[in-house]
Image: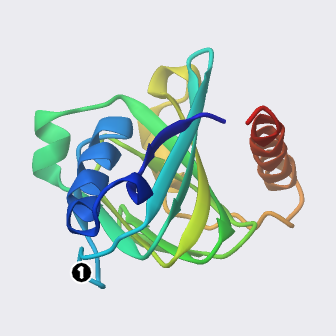
Amino acid sequence: MPDVARTLDLPPGQRFDYWKHVLSDTFVPLEVSSPGGDADFLGRLRGTELGSLRLIEVRAEPHTALRTARLVKTAPAGCYKIAVQLRGTAVLIQDGREAVLGPGDFAFYDTDRPYTLALTEHRMLVLIFPRDMLGLPQHRLAALTATRLPGEAGGMAALICPFLVKIADLLDEED
């Protein structure tokens, strides 16, 4: 999986500002903060496109990404995301729900509604796809956002998580 961006190549004082910029360019416009300050932030994005799908691997130190109502209004993206937690923890908040994700868990969220994603030091895969790809009413999908789906659970969860992890592993072999 080719690098999209990594902070290690920059001087420590410039790393977090770069990270904020690259997250907004890669995903959607976001407000990004770090509990540890921005002096020596380490983060790496790698990604690939699979038709109209984008798969992005995020490895980074703790930070929070906030998609505000103002950002949604000024820069709608028309996408959904599925985040698969591979290492560390994440808390996803959207539509009045909060999902705490550990390794193997995943959650679904909508880029055209406000959300907060708070992350510890982590590795996460994010699958991004157009909203119209599912062909389901948005009000029905809204009931699924920020709901933790354990990777070891049966049904669709048991298929999606290992599939995405395997794709990332296969792309790693291309490096």
Instruction: Evaluate whether residue 99 shows in this view.
Output: no
Corner quadrant of residue 97: bottom left
Q: Is residue 108 left or right of residue 34?
A: right
Seen from the viewer's position, the closer of residues 143 and 150 is 150
Q: Amino acid at mark 1?
A: Gly
Corner quadrant of residue 34: bottom left
Give the number of callouts.
1
Looking at the picture, how far across and down is residue 49, in whole percent? 59, 23
Residue where numbered disc 1 is placed: 37
Quadrant in the picture for the N terminus: top right
Looking at the picture, how far across and down is residue 58, in whole percent? 53, 54
Q: Is residue 81 left or right of residue 124?
A: left
Quadrant in the picture for the C terminus: top right
Instruction: Evaluate whether residue 109 shows in this view.
Output: yes
Looking at the picture, how far across and down is residue 121, in whole percent? 52, 76
Element assignment for label 1: loop
Residue furthest top as drawn: 51
Q: Is residue 160 left or right of residue 1?
A: right
Corner quadrant of residue 127: top right
